[in-house]
Image (cartoon, helix red, strand yellow):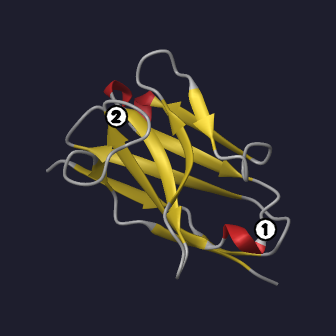
């Protein structure tokens, strides 16, 4: 059925890198805007990055603008979040979500994955 699944999270030291993947099943991800959103315990959800469905424009949070990038591989029906120079404050569950426009709306208007844990610690 229609679903999104994130992968690529894990434990990494400060200054390290991770690439998160968001793979869609049951629909064509290229036809949708896709956002990455994170939530740490006790904190509000934070929109990290989003790529539009039409012109490919992107929007990034100030906290990650110079360190993260978002990209698509339409042949794999996947969107990636490349994370570099990771900091402890990047620790969170990272979700991807698809919708008509950036930013993706909450479920059920937007489609969300179950999330993947990223932990940045020495």
Quadrant of the rendered structure where residue 59 is? top right
Q: Position of residue 113 (x, y in %)?
A: 34, 58
13 and 73: which is toward the camera: 13
How many C-alpha atoms fall within 10 Å of the one at disc 1: few (<14), some, or many (≥20)? Answer: some
Q: Nearer the viewer, residue 9 or 87?
A: 87
Task: Tell me which label, 1 or 2, sits earlier in the chain.
Answer: 2
Q: In the rendered image, which residue does mark 1 sit on?
A: 87
Q: Give residue 109's quadrant in the image.
A: top left
Left or right, residue 27 beside residue 39: left
Q: Which mark is residue 29?
A: 2
What residue is at 50 percent from the left and 50 percent from the top? 36
Q: Residue at x 57, y 72 (%)?
A: 92
Identify the element where label 1 is drawn: loop
Asked if 115 appears above or below 120 in the picture, the reply is above
Q: Where residue 37 sits in the image (x, y, percent)?
A: 49, 55
Q: Residue furthest left?
A: 1
Residue at 75% from the left image edge and 59% from the top image edge: 17
Residue 30, relative to residue 10: is it above or below? above
Q: Secondary structure at mark 2?
A: helix
Q: Badge 2: how crowded within 10 Å, few (<14), some, or many (20+)?
A: many
State the count of labels. Answer: 2
Q: Position of residue 108 (x, y in %)?
A: 19, 52
Above or below: residue 56 compared with residue 13: above
Residue 49 is left or right of residue 7, and the answer is right
Q: Residue furthest right?
A: 15
Quadrant where the C terminus is found in the figure: bottom right
- Foreground: 22 or 49? 49
Tell me which residue sits at (31%, 30%) in the image: 100
Point out residue 22 in the picture as x, y percentages from the top left corner.
44, 50
Q: Nearer the viewer, mark 1 or mark 2?
A: 1
């Amino acid at each position: 059925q229609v679903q999104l699944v994130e992968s690529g999270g894990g434990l990494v030291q400060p200054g390290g890198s991770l690439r998160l993947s968001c793979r869609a099943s049951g629909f064509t991800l290229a036809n949708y805007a896709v956002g990455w959103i994170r939530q740490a315990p006790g904190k509000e959800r934070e929109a990290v990055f989003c790529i539009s469905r039409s012109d490919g424009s992107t929007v990034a949070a100030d906290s990650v603008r110079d360190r993260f990038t978002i990209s698509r591989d339409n042949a794999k029906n996947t969107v990636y979040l490349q994370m570099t120079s990771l900091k402890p404050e990047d620790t969170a569950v990272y979700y991807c979500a698809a919708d008509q426009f950036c930013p993706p709306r909450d479920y059920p208007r937007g489609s969300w994955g179950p999330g993947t844990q990223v932990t940045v610690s020495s």
